[in-house]
Amino acid sequence: MREDRYAAAMLEHYEMGEEEDRLVASNAGQLEFERTQEIVLRRLPPPPAVVADIGGGPGRYALWLAGLGYRVVHRDVVPLHVEQLLAAAAADAESGARPAIDSALGDARDLDLTDASVDAVLLLGPLYHLTRRADRIQALREACRVVQPGGPVFGAAISRWAARYDAVLRLRLYEQVPEMLEAVGPLERTGVIPPLAPGWFTAYTHRPGQLRDEFGLAGLVATDVVSVECGAFLLPDLKERMADPAARKVIMDSARALERVPELIGLGSHLLATGQRP
């Protein structure tokens, strides 16, 4: 089955261990991380609320939330990610830097959490690693089930045009994998980024309206859908500008100003939807 092939490719990619530092080591990753944090904080209840970080990878957001005083439940399908977070969380707990984090293996489509047991849910990875629409809706339904009534659910998606903007124009990955140029057209029609090489990043990519619709089909009220980076991730001098306080403010203010412009929402690499359990 295609889903089995893509799941195997996803595990192969993440078992390489590169995700642990992506949000802090790469220029575009730092912008994604900071913008996601500020968008989430707009609707997140105050600490010590319980936040479920589902598909939370090696735990950058889990550690950030714990540092703010939240109680964090972390689940991820990749064993290496759970190991990495448990090691980091144990070191922090010993030093008293952060409260303990509950981390374990788990599938976003079938959570081991009880109904209405958390105050908010982050789905910052699962929706773009489930190529079947039914699986994405099931993951959102599980988030709706475990969050308190009225609680927020945040779902990140990769923009349908990220492969062309990011992989082709910015990173020029076709120089390493020439098949990328032939694949970009079909993937913009189907939404699916196929595994073009060993360890290749695979994903499902969304149109903004489609992301909102999937939240609704899962029983969530989609209160907001925004572009995370807008076009700023394409800046060749992004690292230098983010390091300068004045230039960084210009970038962040521009991203905020453009985040809901209908014609531009799909320009950035990532979309972030906020939903609410009725």
Image (spheres, grey):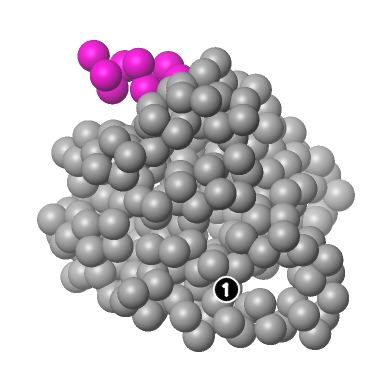
Quadrant into which the C terminus falls: bottom left
Res. 268 visible in picture? yes
Q: Nearer the viewer, residue 126 or 93?
A: 126
Could you tell me what secondary structure mostly forms the magenta stretch? Answer: helix
250 shown above or below 160: below
Res. 41 visible in picture? no
Q: Nearer the viewer, residue 142 or 169?
A: 169
Amino acid found under the numbered disc labelled 1? Glu
Q: Nearer the viewer, residue 250 or 219?
A: 250
Quadrant into which the N terminus falls: top left
213 shown above or below 86: below
Q: Nearer the viewer, residue 200 or 83?
A: 200
Give coordinates of residue 209: x percent, y percent.
Answer: 23, 64
- Identify the secondary structure beneath mark 1: helix
Q: Which residue is mark 1?
A: 38
Task: Specify start and end residues of the magenta stretch as a single range.
Answer: 1-11
Give coordinates of residue 187: x percent, y percent.
Answer: 32, 38
Residue 206 in magenta stretch: no
In the displayed structure image, the side of residue 96 where residue 67 appears, left or right = left
The residue shown at (39%, 38%) is 184
Give the class, few, some or many, for how many residues have Cα within 10 Å of label 1's Cα (few <14, many ≥20).
Answer: few
The residue shown at (24%, 39%) is 190
231 shown above or below 189: below
